[in-house]
Image (cartoon, rainbow, N blue to C red):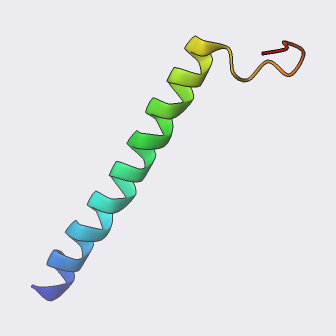
Amino acid sequence: MIGFIVGTFFGGVVGMTATCLCVVAGQADRMNCTNPDKKI
């Protein structure tokens, strides 16, 4: 039972981290922040 609870929390943390990274990467693509040749 403890393993299930720990696994659920760990999976939730990993999932939220991956989701946040994907959202930030999508925003950067929309704003063209990844183009090193462009001067801001």
Q: Residue at x 42, y 52 (%)?
A: 17
Residue 22 located left or right of residue 32: left
Q: Is 8 located above or below residue 39 in the figure?
A: below
Image mark count: 0
Give the percent coordinates (x, y) of residue 1.
Answer: 9, 85
Horizontal placement of 5 versus 38: left or right? left
- Above or below residue 38? Residue 10 is below
* Residue furthest left as drawn: 1
Residue most toward the front?
A: 40
Horizontal and vertical percent position of residue 3:
20, 83
Image quarter in which the C terminus is found: top right
Residue visible at 27% across and 58% down in the picture: 12
Judge whether 20 appears above or below 27 on screen: below
Q: Is residue 6 above or below residue 35?
A: below
Q: Residue at horizontal 23%, vertical 78%? A: 6
Nearer to me, 10 or 29: 29
Q: Position of residue 32 (x, y in %)?
A: 67, 14
- Going by the picture, which residue comes out furthest to the right? 37
- In the rendered image, which quarter is residue 37 located in? top right
What x and y, as percent, mark residue 35?
A: 79, 18
Q: Is residue 39 left or right of residue 30?
A: right
Q: Residue at x 44, y 31 (%)?
A: 23
